[in-house]
C-alpha cells in the first residue's frame, strides 16, 4: 500500500498547478496579516480600555438591531464578555504570532480544503479519462489498493497543506507582530464565562478540531470523482456543496434543524472553547454523525470505482 500512496503523492506534487494552489494559501495568510495591520487590530494602544468600551457599545447595538441572526447575537455576547474580562483583569488585548495563528486556523483549513477538493476531484476521474488507470491495473494492484492509496494521498495533501498554512501564519505573524506570547494564555468564552488554556494547546487543538471539514469536503469530491468521469463536474459540485454548506452552517448557527446538517458538525472547537450551536448536541454525537457521512460516501464511491469499466 505504501508504494502506491507514495506514487500518488508524486503525481500530486510534480504538477505545477499544485504548487500554484499552495502559493494561494500562503498569499491568503499574508493578506490577512496586511488587513489586520492596516486596520490597527494587531497593536495595543494606550487608550485600549476606551477602545474596548466603545467596541462593547457597538456589539450591544448589533445584538439589539432588528431581526439579527442567532450567530450575530452569540458573537456579540462573546465579544462583550471577553472584553469585560480584559477590562476587569487589566489585560490589554494584543496580537502575536501565536494568537494570530489560532484565530486564522479555521480559515486556513477552509482554504486548504477547497484546494484539496481540486485534487480529489480529478485524482480518480482523470485516470479514467486519460486511460492511465489501465497502467495501474497492469501492475498487479487490486482496485481496492488503488482506491485507498488515492484517497489517503488526497487526505494527506490536505493535512500537510493546512499544517503548512498554519506554520506560515506563525512565521509571518512573528515577523510582523513578534514571536512573544507563546507562554501567554488563550482566552475563550464558554457558558458566558471566560476560560483560558496555554496558547500552544489552543493552536494544536484548533488545528485538529477543524479537520472534519477537510475530511467531509475532500471525501465528497473524491466520491463524485469516483462516480463520474468528468473532473469538471466533480470539482464544481463539490466546491458548490462545500461553500454553501460552510455558509449555511455559519448563518444558521443555533437553529434546531442544523443538528442534522453535516457542515454544522465540522467545527468541533465549540465543544472545548465555546458552546455547541444546538443545546443537547454532544461531541460524541458530532463524531458519530461525521463518521456516518464518511462511511456513506465511501459506500457509494467504492463500488462504483471497483465496477467501472476501463475498456
Image (spheres, grey):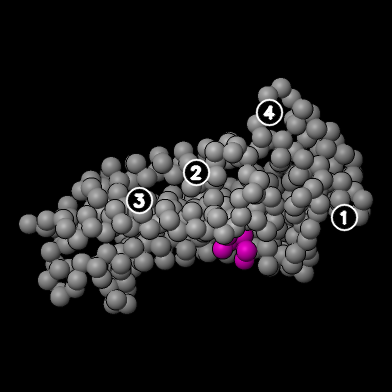
Q: Is residue 205 magenta?
A: yes
- Foreground tag (4 vs 1): 4
Q: Residues within 10 Å of mark 2 (few under 14, many from 20)?
A: some
Disc 4, disc 3: CB below 8 Å?
no
Question: Farthest residue in the left direction?
Answer: 311
Q: Residues within 10 Å of mark 1 (few under 14, many from 20)?
A: few
Q: Position of residue 119 (x, y in %)?
A: 34, 55
Q: CA distance from mark 4 to mark 2?
A: 22 Å
Mark 2, secondary structure of its residue: loop
Which residue is nearer to you in this view: 31 or 276? 276
The disc placed on residue 221 is 3
Looking at the rendering, the stretch of residues picked out in magenta corresponds to 204-210
- Foreground tag (3 vs 1): 3
Q: Which residue is mark 1?
A: 91
> Which residue is rendered at x = 17% and y = 52% of the image?
129
Mark 3 or 1 closer to N-term? 1
Q: Is residue 118 magenta?
A: no
Q: Which residue is mark 2?
A: 261
Q: CA distance from mark 3 to mark 2?
A: 18 Å
Disc 4, disc 2: CB below 8 Å?
no
- Foreground tag (1 vs 2): 2
Q: Which residue is mark 4?
A: 68
* Horizontal side, residue 266 vs residue 73: left or right: left
Amino acid at each position: 500500500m505504501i508504494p502506491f500512496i507514495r506514487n500518488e503523492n508524486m503525481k500530486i506534487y510534480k504538477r505545477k498547478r499544485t504548487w500554484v494552489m499552495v502559493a494561494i494559501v500562503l498569499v491568503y495568510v499574508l493578506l490577512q496579516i496586511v488587513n489586520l495591520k492596516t486596520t490597527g487590530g494587531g497593536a495595543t494602544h494606550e487608550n485600549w480600555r476606551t477602545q474596548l468600551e466603545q467596541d462593547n457599545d457597538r456589539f450591544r447595538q448589533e445584538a439589539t438591531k432588528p431581526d439579527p441572526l442567532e450567530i450575530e447575537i452569540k458573537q456579540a455576547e462573546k465579544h462583550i464578555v471577553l472584553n469585560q474580562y480584559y477590562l476587569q483583569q487589566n489585560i490589554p488585548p494584543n496580537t502575536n504570532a501565536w494568537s494570530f495563528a489560532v484565530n486564522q486556523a479555521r480559515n486556513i483549513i477552509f482554504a486548504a480544503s477547497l484546494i484539496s477538493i481540486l485534487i480529489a476531484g480529478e485524482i480518480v476521474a482523470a485516470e479514467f479519462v486519460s486511460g492511465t488507470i489501465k497502467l495501474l491495473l497492469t501492475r498487479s494492484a487490486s482496485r481496492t489498493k488503488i482506491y485507498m492509496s488515492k484517497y489517503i494521498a488526497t487526505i494527506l495533501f490536505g493535512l500537510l497543506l493546512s499544517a503548512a498554512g498554519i506554520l506560515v501564519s506563525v512565521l509571518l505573524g512573528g515577523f510582523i507582530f513578534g514571536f512573544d506570547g507563546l507562554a501567554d494564555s488563550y482566552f475563550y468564552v464558554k457558558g458566558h464565562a471566560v476560560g483560558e488554556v496555554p496558547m500552544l494547546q489552543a493552536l494544536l487543538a484548533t488545528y485538529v478540531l477543524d479537520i472534519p471539514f477537510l475530511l467531509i469536503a475532500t471525501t465528497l469530491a473524491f466520491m463524485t470523482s469516483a462516480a463520474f468521469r468528468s473532473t469538471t463536474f466533480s470539482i464544481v459540485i463539490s466546491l458548490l456543496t462545500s461553500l454553501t454548506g460552510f455558509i449555511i452552517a455559519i448563518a444558521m448557527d443555533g437553529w434546531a434543524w442544523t443538528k442534522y446538517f453535516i457542515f454544522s458538525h465540522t467545527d468541533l472547537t465549540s465543544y472545548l472553547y465555546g458552546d455547541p450551536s444546538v443545546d443537547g448536541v454532544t461531541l460524541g454525537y458530532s463524531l458519530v454523525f461525521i463518521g456516518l457521512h464518511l462511511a456513506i460516501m465511501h459506500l457509494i464511491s467504492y463500488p462504483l470505482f471497483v465496477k467501472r469499466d476501463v475498456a
